[in-house]
Image: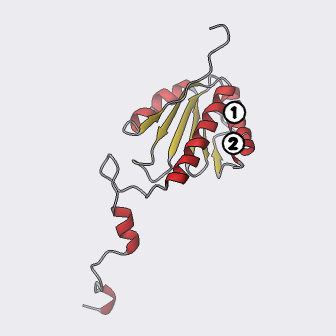
Amino acid sequence: MSEQFKVHSTTPSTDETLLSSRTGTNGLPVRPVNAEKQNASKELAMTVATAADDRKASDIVLLNVAEVSYLADYFAIATGFSRVQVRAIAQSIEEKVETQCQRLPLRVEGKAEGSWIVMDYGDVIVHILLPPEREFYNLEAFWGHAERIEFTASQPVGE
């Protein structure tokens, strides 16, 4: 056997040990969670939800996905009832997060079409969808094993 194919160590590296030391509710390894970072992420997710509510987003859901995903700590999911409203919700979120949390999204997708906008803040991923897209993709069911975070939307005028 040539030298390039020999295994020189069977001991896992520090990185491998760290990654495999915790598993989520689905049995898959999850990244370590720093409590201070988790609190900042939750604050960001709540700011996102409040900004979406300011633009009359419907059915706002916050999911703590830190224990079940490498993607982010939180998902925020909201419904807008027109492409214009979906874009307005995204704009409201971007402005409020920049003002209150001094952060801009790392990436935004779907603004031109306006049926499903995804805003990636790294630790928080925001999904703003029209009702048909939300029903079809059913992100809450897909991430159903994630913990739901309580968010109380403001009451509509007249109730």
Quarter assignment of residue 20: bottom left
The x and y percentages for residue 113 are 66, 36
**Residue 14 spot, x, y in % from top left:** 39, 73
Above or below, 53 against 71 in this view is: above
Against 146, residue 1 (above or below) is below
**Amino acid carrying mark 1 in the image:** Arg
Say the numbered circle drawn on residue 87: 1
Residue marked by disc 2 = 97
Report helix, strand or loop for mark 2: helix
- Taking the image as shown, residue 41 lies to the left or right of residue 108, namely left
Residue drawn at (65%, 52%) of the image = 106
Residue 115's label in the rendered image is none
What is the three-letter code of the residue carrying label 2? Answer: Val
Q: Secondary structure at mark 1?
A: helix
Q: Residue at the far front: name it.
A: 36
Crowding at mark 2 (Cα within 10 Å: few <14, some 14-19, many 20+): many
Q: Find the distance from the CA under tag 2 to the CA under tag 1.
A: 15 Å
Q: Nearer the viewer, mark 2 or mark 1?
A: 2
